[in-house]
Amino acid sequence: MKERRYAVFGAGRQGRAAAYDLARFGNASEVLIADRDPYAAGSAEVEVNDLLGKKVVRSLRIDVADSMEMRRVLWGIDGFVGAMHYALNHALTKTAIENGCHMVDLGGNTGVVLKQHELHRQAASVCVSIIPDCGMAPGFDVNLACHVLGQFARPEKLTIYCGGIPQRPKPPLGYHFPFALSGLVNECSGYADIINDGEVTQMSTLFSFEEIALPEIGLLEATHTSGGLSTAPWTLQAKYPTLRTLEYKTLRYPGHWKILRDLTKEGRLADGLKEFESKERASPHDPEDIGIVSVHGHGLTKDGKALTVIAEVVDRYDAVTGFTAMQRLTGFHASIALIAATERLTVGGVHAVESLDPKMVVDEFAKRGITVDETHAVCSK
């Protein structure tokens, strides 16, 4: 693998983890980390280079809306991560195509992603690979779902349970706001795209709660939220016609979802969450978290026996790097996807994250010390 030059736009927590991983595993001669805030970019450069023990990361200030400046920065860059607000991802996709750069982003809003896919032909014509929706969810969750679905002759039902939660929850929310507040409001608003009775349909977010117990963590509550599957319902419906149910649910500590549903009913979701976030920021910072991706699949084997497969990742804050589980599962996945776009994908275009080889993704996470635990149960039907 030849040396590469990468860029990361957005010097927040997930962008820093992506830059670190690209420098470690992407055979990078240089990784640029850029942000409108020069202090954020500069501190990211120092942090990541200190972790690496060498100077690979270089920071700069940039406004991604400045096309001339972006053209200058992207000269000689093989690919970049868009670790910024999802509203910028469509424009970043156009920028990637115009400058002949591969690109991945952290997704999060299906409407924006569908607009990005409309640029497929333009990307293909210049042999540029774009992969929206990278990260913990959407992203790794969907790849792990594809890993599970591939083990059935006739998959019938699949549910993804996913969440980032603090190791030491504080009332009343038991939450620590690991990413932008706007992203949290986005995932708790509107509808979730799912497969129900074999058809893609929409389910209201925060509609119903399900209890799920996890070893060493305890009882959690799950509910439908938007964006966690992104384009997967349509892709997987076409690929697996026997799949009757596909759902994504976000995990939180008990009581969290009731508070958010009550705020939604009062029309105060954004304002209420802002108040909770302000109180959380005022308290001593506790970075130690847990990241959970748990995929439960049901279907039939080739000989007609009922099979249940559970594939699960439970990651925790890493004291060595100082990265949270959310950073690791999000930033590392974006890096894995960008390296794949640069080194493995031979056909350009805007590719759904579920088009990545699930075995490759699972294997790459294992190289980073993040492993999948699987259980299988077979019985006659």
Image: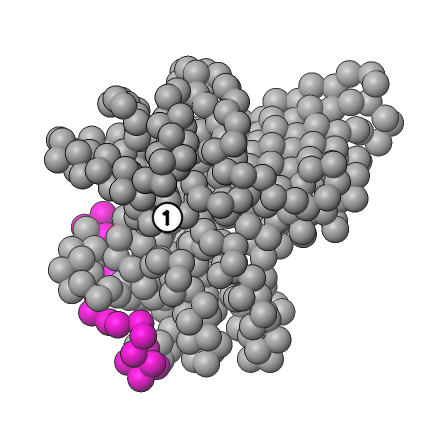
Horizontal placement of 321 versus 126: left or right?
Answer: left
- The percent position of residue 110, horizontal first and vertical second, equals 52, 54
Q: How is the image coloured?
A: one colour
- Amino acid type at mark 1: Gly
Q: Is residue 30 visible?
A: yes
Q: Residue at x 18, y 39 (%)?
A: 278
Indicate the secondary structure of the residue bearing disc 1.
helix
Quarter where residue 369 is shown = top left
The magenta segment: 48-72
Asked if the magenta segment contains residue 121, the reply would be: no
Asked if the magenta segment contains residue 49, the reply would be: yes
370 shown above or below 233: above
Q: Residue at x 56, y 34 (%)?
A: 160
Q: Quadrant of the C terminus?
A: top right
34 shown above or below 147: below
Q: Can you identify the residue that label 1 sits on?
A: 183
Residue placed furthest toward the front: 266
